[in-house]
Image (spheres, rainbow, N blue to C red):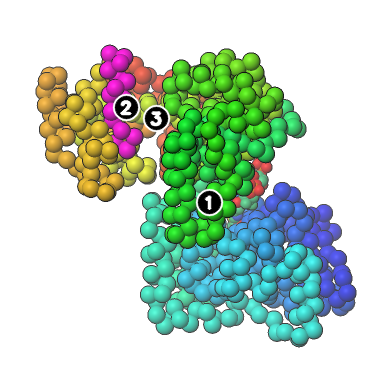
């Protein structure tokens, strides 16, 4: 008898319960357990219907990803599905939590499905660079029709119980999964309802068989933004086979594609990223079982772009926020922007029509820092200047209740220095959100010298609760993300001196998979900020200075490294810029040479990886995978390349060290010298990822 799956007989209904925490994934033990229990239930003459259900927080969340890439263990999932589907007694999947991937495929092999009202059902395999490999691409279109199947499988996004009911994916929404499943099973028996096997039911495929454009239009709409990902297109192909081929042939095709994707570099990188994200939530040096401080009420200081976005993130998760400003006007402006943002999202159908009202009601906009006194967590999001931040922290120290967590949203500044303004440095840390803060998932949680473990733990937990991906980093100029970005920026600027043009550099990096090139990014942020700061510090960056002197500050002036048409954010090539670069170079006595795209990619990405290695040497990041998570969620590094450090491991560290040494020599740039750590790992044929 299995210790993770049990069979109980209740008055003619056999209840098969999976109990394999944390998420009831389909490990070999779970597969074996289900198979045994289902076979026993079929053999038991007192049982007339079988209900498959789960204990704990969720229905089966998919295949066990930790088994991927290892030798397969018996029984295979296909055998389990065949047992459920071919059962002569009706089988019912009773779903709560998340029925995902192989979990939903198990449910689709059952004859009927019910779910509680909070359940989510989906096939997210594309997010791991895969496609559903246990019949999902063949059974889901038969359950809900090809259009919704494309939407769910190609995007990987789940649907809720109500949509599942409307689309025919489930038969009923029940109060509680297990009991509801049992009641439903009894009803089936009473009504003598015929068993429905999706494999034999092509009704919902008929329309797309008659007019294939139903399918191709849905695919075109869902694959618009896939930027270099292989799996979504492969998944769409597999759904196409459901339309074109008999069930068993389609299943065979699906299996072939699944196995091909499983061994692809993209899927390996995406699976790596899945675990890297979860690993990042485990804080090194914080003892197991430490009780995080409770965070129920939050105050945010500053209703500007960052403060407003941060407030929205908390409110979106149902956490009330006191939003503090220095004056009524600034506060009203901030609240107005948030309101408009919510209204626009509701108008697009992104949130329910009544959500803007409900969410705004959770924000208590107020003037005066004394209003922070009830907050468990205070996030300062004022102007990025040390003197101002220090002043604000001095005031926070006066009004915050004892034990409150005091966070600064600085992106560069020394948090240890900020903490000194308080008499409680153990309560101070950084929460570096990325703009727009209500959208971007990354939150660099910056651990200062004295930050207490329960403070760190609390902030990591609350960040996850509001849908962010927290990564704990140490204090240094720019922390992990911006520090590496600066290293990349330095090379991008240098490439212009060597002969590349902004559009070439940006095109090479977007082709590599970045959402935006460094120069378009500069235009978005505004070139004048750096220009003014360089002037203050007596530093020059000739090409950028020349652009700014010509009034080209970026998007805000309609021209920077690129030109922008009225109302558009699309960067357009501008011959004026080429002229300005040529003039600057000839003034400096430099000649342009041909720069290859390969050099652009190597110099920009290898320089930031080298900085990443330095960050590891200094202990600013605990793991290479933490750096990858920062770049995946803060800067749009292409997930199918796993993050910069994973990419480095893939390229090979010896090659990286050799190329960096070469560029350091050629361009006489000491910052490109491979770091000690990189050299050592390269010598041992090691990998960043293997450092734990
Ligand atoms: C698939 O099904 C292929 C099939 O089509 C074909 C097969 C032939 N396996 O995320 P959390 C672990 S592909 C192993 O922090 P949450 C996770 O690592 C799969 N482990 O919780 C973590 O461990 P730890 C398709 C898994 O509440 C712990 O569970 N399915 C798996 O924020 C808690 O996870 C998916 O892609 C797994 N499948 O979110 C679903 N899932 O504590 C992937 C989780 O040691 N999973 N773990 O760090 C998820 O999306 C989320 O985990 C879920 C819960 C929403 C379920």
Q: Could you say which disc has been placed on residue 128 in the image?
A: 1
**What is the C-alpha distance between the residues marked 2 and 3?**
16 Å
> If you read the primary sequence from the N terminus, does the residue marked by circle 2 or circle 3 appear first?
3
Q: Which residue is mark 2?
A: 529
Q: Relative to the observer, which residue lies in front, 610 or 308?
A: 308
Task: Tell me the magenta residue range.
Answer: 523-538
Instruction: Count neighbours of disc 3 (C-alpha within 10 A) and say few if under 14, some if 14 to 19, many if 20 or more.
Output: some
- Secondary structure beneath disc 3? helix
Does 535 appear in magenta? yes
The quadrant in which the C terminus is found is top right
Does residue 488 sit above or below 390 in this rendering?
below
Q: Which residue is mark 3?
A: 485
- Secondary structure beneath disc 2? helix
The residue at 55%/29% (across/down) is 368
Q: Relative to the observer, which residue lies in front, 678 or 210?
A: 210
**Total marks placed:** 3
Residue 684 position, x and y percent, is 51, 24
> Is label 2 within 8 A of ligand 1 (CB to nearest ligand atom)?
no
Does residue 671 sit above or below 443 in this rendering?
above
Residue 416 position, x and y percent, is 55, 17
Does 581 appear in magenta? no
Q: Could you say which disc has been placed on residue 518 in the image?
A: none
- On screen, residue 109 versus residue 494, left or right, reads right
Is there any visible trace of residue 631 in the rendered image?
no
The residue at 11%/20% (across/down) is 587
The quadrant in which the N terminus is found is bottom right
Between circles 2 and 3, the one closer to the viewer is: 2
- Secondary structure beneath disc 1? helix
> Is label 1 within 8 A of ligand 1 (CB to nearest ligand atom)?
yes
């Amino acid at each position: 008898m299995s210790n993770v799956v049990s069979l109980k007989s209740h008055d003619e209904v056999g209840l098969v319960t999976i109990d394999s925490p944390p998420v009831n994934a389909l490990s070999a033990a779970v597969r074996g357990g289900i198979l045994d229990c289902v076979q026993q239930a079929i053999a038991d003459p007192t049982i007339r219907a079988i209900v498959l259900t789960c204990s704990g927080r969720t229905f089966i969340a998919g295949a066990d990803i930790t088994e991927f890439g290892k030798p397969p263990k018996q029984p295979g999932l296909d055998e389990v599905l065949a047992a459920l589907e071919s059962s002569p007694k009706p089988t019912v999947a009773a779903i709560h939590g998340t029925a995902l991937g192989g979990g939903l495929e198990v449910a689709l092999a059952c004859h009927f499905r019910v779910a509680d009202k909070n359940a989510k059902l989906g096939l997210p395999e594309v997010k791991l660079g895969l496609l559903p490999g246990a019949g999902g691409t063949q059974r889901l279109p038969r359950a809900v029709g090809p259009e919704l199947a494309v939407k769910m499988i190609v995007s990987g996004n789940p649907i809720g119980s109500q949509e599942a009911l409307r689309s025919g994916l489930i038969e009923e929404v029940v109060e509680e999964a297990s009991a509801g499943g049992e009641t439903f099973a009894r009803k089936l028996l009473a009504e003598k309802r015929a068993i429905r096997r999706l494999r034999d039911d092509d009704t919902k495929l008929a329309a797309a068989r008659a007019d294939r454009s139903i399918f191709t239009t849905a695919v075109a709409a869902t694959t618009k933004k896939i930027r270099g990902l292989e799996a979504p297109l492969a998944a769409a192909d597999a759904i196409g086979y459901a339309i074109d081929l008999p069930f068993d042939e389609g299943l065979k095709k699906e299996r072939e594609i699944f196995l091909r994707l499983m061994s692809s570099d993209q899927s390996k990188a995406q699976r790596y990223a899945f675990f890297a994200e979860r690993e990042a939530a485990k804080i090194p040096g914080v003892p197991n079982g430490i009780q995080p401080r409770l965070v129920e009420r939050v105050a945010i200081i500053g209703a500007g772009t960052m403060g407003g976005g941060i407030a929205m993130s908390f409110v979106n998760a149902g956490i009330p926020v006191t939003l503090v400003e220095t004056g009524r006007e600034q506060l009203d402006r901030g609240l107005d922007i948030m309101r408009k943002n919510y209204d626009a999202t509701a108008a697009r159908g992104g949130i329910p029509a009544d959500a803007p009202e409900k969410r705004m009601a959770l924000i208590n906009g107020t003037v005066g820092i004394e209003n922070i006194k009830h907050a468990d967590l205070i996030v300062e999001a004022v102007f990025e200047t040390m003197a101002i931040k220090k002043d604000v922290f001095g005031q926070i120290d006066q009004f915050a209740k004892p034990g409150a967590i005091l966070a600064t949203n600085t992106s560069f500044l020394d948090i240890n220095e900020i903490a000194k303004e308080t008499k409680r440095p153990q309560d101070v840390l950084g929460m570096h959100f990325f703009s727009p803060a209500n959208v971007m998932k990354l939150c660099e949680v910056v651990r200062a010298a004295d930050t207490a473990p329960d403070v760190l733990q609390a902030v990591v937990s609350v960040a996850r609760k509001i849908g962010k991906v927290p990564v704990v980093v140490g204090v240094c100029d720019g922390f992990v993300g911006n520090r590496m970005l600066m290293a990349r920026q330095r090379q991008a600027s240098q490439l212009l001196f060597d002969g590349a043009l902004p559009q070439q550099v940006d095109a090479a990096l977007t082709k590599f998979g970045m959402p935006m090139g460094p120069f378009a990014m500069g235009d978005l942020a505004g070139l004048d900020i750096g220009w003014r700061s360089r002037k203050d510090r007596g530093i020059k960056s000739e090409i950028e200075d020349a652009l700014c002197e010509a009034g080209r500050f970026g998007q805000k002036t309609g021209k920077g490294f690129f030109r922008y048409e009225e109302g558009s954010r699309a960067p357009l090539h501008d011959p004026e810029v080429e002229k300005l670069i040529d003039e600057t170079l000839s003034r400096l006595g430099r000649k342009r040479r041909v720069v290859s795209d390969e050099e652009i990619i190597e110099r920009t990405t290898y320089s930031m990886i080298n900085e990443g290695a330095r960050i590891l040497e200094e202990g600013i990041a605990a793991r290479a995978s933490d750096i990858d998570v920062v770049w995946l969620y803060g800067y749009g590094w292409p997930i199918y390349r796993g993050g910069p450090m994973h990419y480095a491991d893939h390229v090979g560290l010896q090659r990286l060290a050799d190329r960096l040494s070469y560029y350091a020599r050629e361009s006489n740039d000491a910052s490109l010298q491979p770091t000690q750590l990189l050299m050592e790992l390269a010598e041992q044929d090691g990998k960043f990822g293997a450092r734990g």
